[in-house]
Amino acid sequence: MPPAPPPAAHAGPGPGRWIATGGAVLAALAAAGLVMAWSTQQRVKALETELVKRQQDSGAQAAEAQLLARQAQEGVHDGAAKLALLEARVAETSLQRSQIEELLQSMARSRDENVLADVEAAVRVAQQQSAITGSADPLVATLKQVDERLSRYAQPRLERVRRAVAQDLEKARAAGATDIPLLSIRLDEVIRQIDELPLLSAVDRRGAPRAPAGARPALAAAASASAAAPGWGDGLGERWRGMLEQVWAEVRDLVRVTRIDVPEAMLVAPEQAFFLRENLKLRLLNARLALLSRQFDIAQSDLRDAQSALERYFDRSSRRVNAALDGVRQVAAQARTVAVPRPDATLAAIAAAGR
């Protein structure tokens, strides 16, 4: 740029000066524009580079995203297939479970029905045995076994049956029982004693009366007189006393004083005593057979006849006769029909549970 001419002294601004100033300003503006253009160009290049880089990154991320999306889609397909397989298996398992539950319920129902059938059969058999034997022991034993068996199952369905069993068990235990074996043993003991029991018509020296009050002083005086003889009379006195005792024994056997309340008892001949004892044995044997066959009315009739024969024909002062009478009376008192309770509550509960 050419140097400006020196200004003239005291001269106003000329047109050249304004042009130079304008040129300088334009040159400065142009330089600034170039700088800004260059800076802008550099910035645009940097932006283009950044855009390219980001575009490349975006492309790589897009490719990676597509790959991940493809993998995710494949995973979704696999998951869907697995889910469908699992659903099928779950459905199959549910079906099998329902079938197993139905089978278990049917088995439990059939087991309960079998238990109820066995219990009912056992109770009915025990009831028949109790009716035949007249004793509640078979029914008590069966009900105890049934209670123990039901307690092992612990089924709510069978609790009502168990309560009914406990109720019938208490009733059966409360019922009295006739001990037939013990009564038979007592009758056998009385039958064995019949041959040894003394009859009223039999002669018994122990029941003979003693010597009269007047006869004893005479015998004593005779004995003392014979004993008072001196010397040689000692032996004679002893023989005389022995002879008098023998005579008195014979006389005592000839006379017997007895109170007879039943006159026909004394009319029994010795040969009839055998048939009397045998008839009494037959009565007691018939009573024993009637007890074993649970025919208590027949047994009571035979026992009354045997008791009447013992009281009428046998010596009541004998201890053995009294023992035999006591034995017959005890058997007659215990030989009675026992009302065996029926297990109606148990049978009703079984019928209700089986519905």
Image (cartoon, helix red, strand yellow):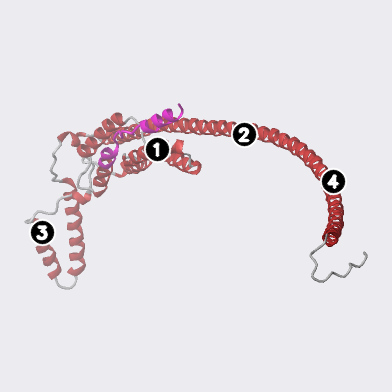
Depth check: give the residue in front, 127 or 178. Answer: 127
Write down the residue under mark 4: 59
Judged left or right of residue 72, residue 195 is: left
Q: Residue furthest top?
A: 355
What's the residue type where badge 2 is placed? Answer: Ile
Q: Are marks 1 and 4 in contact (CB under 8 Å)?
A: no
- The N terminus is located in which quarter? bottom right
- Secondary structure beneath dot 2 equals helix
Instruction: Indicate the position of residue 339 as horizontal and vertical percent values.
Output: 31, 33
What's the residue type where badge 1 is placed? Answer: Val
First along the sequence among labels 1 and 4: 4
Which mark is on residue 216?
3
First along the sequence among labels 2 and 4: 4
Q: Is residue 304 above or below residue 250?
A: above
First along the sequence among labels 1 and 3: 1
Write down the residue under mark 2: 100
